[in-house]
Image (tube, rainbow, N blue to C red):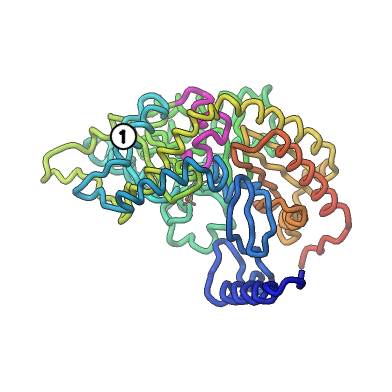
Amino acid sequence: MARRPAASSAKKRQDRLRRDDRAFVWHPFTQMEEWEQESPIIIERGDGRHLVDTEGNRYYDGVSSIWVNIHGHRNRVLDRALHAQLEKIAHSTLLGLSNLPSIELARQLIQIAPPGLQKVFYSDNGSTAMEIAIKMAYQYWQQQGSRFRNKKKFLSFDMAYHGDSLGTVSLSGIALFHRAYKPLLFKTFKADPPYCYRCPLQLRYPSCHLACIQPIEATLKAHHQDIAALVIEPMIQGVGGMITSPLGYLKAIRELCTRYDVLLIADEVATGFGRTGKMFACDHEGVTPDLMAVSKGLTGGYMPLAATLTTQRIYDGFLGAYDDFRTFFHGHSYTGNPLGCAVALANLKLFKRTRLLNVLPEKVRTLQRALRGLRSLAHVGQVRQLGLMVGIELVRNKRTKEPYPLEDRIGHKVAMETRRQHLIIRPIGNILVLMPPLTATLQELNVIVEVVKLAIQSATRSPRHIPTRS
Ligand SMILES: *Cc1c(COP(=O)(O)O)cnc(C)c1O
């Protein structure tokens, strides 16, 4: 490597970048004491489904840059849309003004959204989109008359994830993320997730006949007068472990919400824009939620932008004279950012132009076939897949389903192995997550699974797991 004279200056730059990263950057969800000991990969460029680091190494982007990327990096259509918008204006506000791309995008989002959703409220990220859904649902009932004033609480799922702001953390159910902030959170009614591999009712699908719906119905029956909304990640709870729900579950939840006059908030932040094989996860069961949050894939993975979609009924609940003060009191500095909206429009254009939703089923089937080869591995408990979202649950003991202790960091070990093979993945505890960009080729999908298979074998083979500290 040191042949070229430029090599030493490249090495200098690399050392400086690593030093400055350590000195100045605090990384998300990262134990920085550990980070400071490592030499991080520093990404400089993107090229299709690949990331290229400062040393010129290419890595396959196996989790779509944390679940956001759709068409790959440096996509010509998306790049051009951003450039074209830059020639006009980068940002202006939606407070007291409107802007062109946000109008056009709202119209197109309503065209593709589940029927019945009519209005679009913009924000910048998944957490804010969900925060907005919470506030809308709450305020809606407060403005519906005294009969509904007690509808102040929410029903959400254990192991759910809805974001990192305090409202969304309150709705989430990931114990590890909550412990530290518990006194700051509001209380919610909690339901068990439809986690069939570890069924809380110890039943089996389909002979269970979705018995897990009953306790949720019981909660709604007893408390619907206090519940503003039920909050769900439709079809698949992502961060909680890629927990896929059985057929008919989402539809049953929709029916319960309608019956008990509780709003349904669908968090499509991870699932939206083709990730599950359909445009939205709700489309799998023909469900229209009362409020729907989207973000991650909205801009094809290019810009931070989010939207909360809702129905005419909810919207009308906020109408009135100025001094009724039924206004929705919420907004962000970058609400409806024109650059974000312009690239989101190009994202939707690409969906049409490449007929992406039509070519996805073959990719989904190919991935499914490849994943079958993992089931026989000694430490693979279950492989869960919906569309191009995959969770591989690693267990210490396959027969008893005994999990690996978190401190074994088994998922992390597998991810470090795949990285050596130039595949970037990021696990969640013992769950390996695969979420390739939707433009991944059939061959790439097969290679990803093969690399992961070898990495699992290598990371779980040797008895080098640190024993649990007492
Ligand atoms: C990522 C995610 C969020 C939060 O989105 P951010 O943009 O990270 O704030 C919310 N809900 C779900 C289901 C997510 O996957």
Q: Say if the magenta span includes residue 286.
A: yes
Q: Main secondary structure of the magenta part?
A: loop
Residue 181 locus on image (x, y percent): 49, 62
Task: Residue at 55%, 65% (x, y): give it.
Answer: 27
Q: Which residues are magenta?
A: 267-287
Residue under label 1: 119
Which quadrant of the structure image shows residue 400? top right
Q: Nearer the viewer, residue 412 or 54?
A: 54
Q: Quadrant of the C terminus?
A: bottom right
Q: Nearer the viewer, residue 434 or 12?
A: 12
Residue 247 locus on image (x, y percent): 60, 25
> Viewed as shown, does residue 250 lie left or right of 400?
left
Label 1 element class: strand
Task: Residue at 58%, 30% (x, y): give it.
Answer: 277
Residue 367 locus on image (x, y percent): 71, 33
Task: Note whether residue 159 is visible.
Answer: no
Task: Residue at 28%, 41% (x, y): give it.
Answer: 100
Q: Say if the magenta span includes residue 236.
A: no
Task: Residue at 68%, 36% (x, y): give it.
Answer: 384
